[in-house]
Image (cartoon, helix red, strand yellow):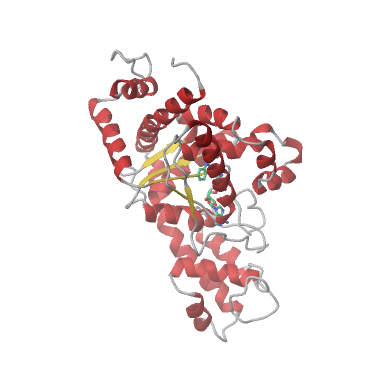
Amino acid sequence: MMGCLWSLFFENSGVDPDGSKKSGANCPSSAEIAHNGILEEKMENKKIILSGIQPSGSATLGSYLGAFRNWAALSNEYECLYMTVDMHAITTRQVPAQLRKNQLEQIAQFIACGIDPDENTLFIQSHVLAHAQLAWVLNCFTMFGELSRMAQFKDKSSKNAENINAGLFTYPTLQAADILLYGTDLVPVGADQKQHVELTRDIAVRFNGVFGDVFKIPEPYIPTVGAKIMDLQAPTKKMSKSEIADGGCILIMDKPEDIMRSFKRAVTDSETEVRFDQETKPGISNLMQIYSCATGKSFEEIEKEFSGRGYGEFKPCVGEAVVELLRPIREETERLLADKAYMQEVYKKGAEKASYIANKTLRKVYKKVGFIER
Ligand code: TYM
């Protein structure tokens, strides 16, 4: 058994099974091999968490509150794998240089948010070949009707009418592969991704129904506050990195003065009372959610704090709280990005660790569906 595992590890790490080094590839040291053995053991003992973010833009306050913050909180207790999903990002057109920049920025942000790269696995999706390989198999276990019902597909295809490509349509099967490769227990995501995790469960159950207990069935893990941060200019729409033009979206890397300007201009309503009511006061309710996440105060405490003070006082206070929340993350991200060698070490080591586990699952799946071993 171990022989097979090691041959998988060798296949992706640049070393032939006989121990000779493939030219031009990185050879793992015995310490690295031991490290992957330790990872495997840890994954048997701890619950596994996996999540990802698209580098299709610079990460937003929504990505931070709905995802990164929770990823960091989970990272000390669980075995966590976090990735920047470049393969998902190219389902819409990207500028290549910007895509590369965004990926490095996101890896740096993971660390800046408090995720220790030595204790967790941080990687770039396309560096682990098994994601594309398993996605193909899962495409054959996913129904056209299921993919047609995905809200993200409907939304993105309405916004990209000139480029409704097959990748955009089969995007959720790649996401299912991301999750199922690692025996993931929990998938921390914002509310918008729940449907994709549910589809992942359906695909896994379908596959297991045919071939036995191959995949672990994952659960979505959605925060109670911050799961859906809305656009400051259009508070019934999710804050999104693809729509940053009009000041409705705050980026983690935004300068304090830009953040303050966006909060002062945030759309509210014709009343003056700071009160949580998503139906009639979506703008104020969104600001209250943001303020609550940034300060830890409950909605009742916020209502009391701003009672009789009006929106004119509330909006800059939210802005200041967000500036202070994001400042250390932005500064640490900038510091990390300046250290190119360290960044490269993090994502290379991450891909190596992830590949080792992912290949084990892929190998099992290939065998089950009837492929002949290479
Ligand atoms: P993406 O890149 O759109 O968003 C990354 C994470 O941030 C959350 N998020 C938000 N949460 C609250 N309010 C917002 N305004 C907001 N905007 C974004 C998202 O819910 C998500 O958790 N398909 C995924 C990426 C992905 C993935 C995976 C996630 C690919 N493979 C495997 C989990 C597991 C996506 O497009 O996320």
Residue 13 percent coordinates (x, y): 36, 23
Q: Is residue 322 left or right of residue 3?
A: right
- At 70% from the left edge and 78% from the top edge, which residue is drawn? 270
Residue 19, above or below 33: above
Residue 309 percent coordinates (x, y): 56, 84
Residue 219 percent coordinates (x, y): 48, 50
Q: Is residue 190 left or right of residue 114?
A: right
- Front in this rendered view, residue 47 or 271: 47
- Front in this rendered view, residue 207 or 155: 207
Residue extending farthest to the bottom is 308
Do we see residue 283 in this rendering? yes
Q: Quadrant of residue 158?
A: top right
- At 62% from the left edge and 74% from the top edge, which residue is drawn? 277
Q: How many marks?
A: 0
Residue 88, above or below 114: above
Residue 42 percent coordinates (x, y): 29, 41
- At 36% from the left edge and 37% from the top edge, which residue is drawn? 346
Do we see residue 100 in this rendering? no
Residue extending farthest to the right is 162
Task: Work out which quarter of the rendered image holds the C terminus and state it.
Answer: top left
- At 54% from the left edge and 47% from the top edge, which residue is drawn? 197
Q: Is residue 265 left or right of residue 63?
A: right
Task: Work out which quarter of the rendered image holds the N terminus and state it.
Answer: top left
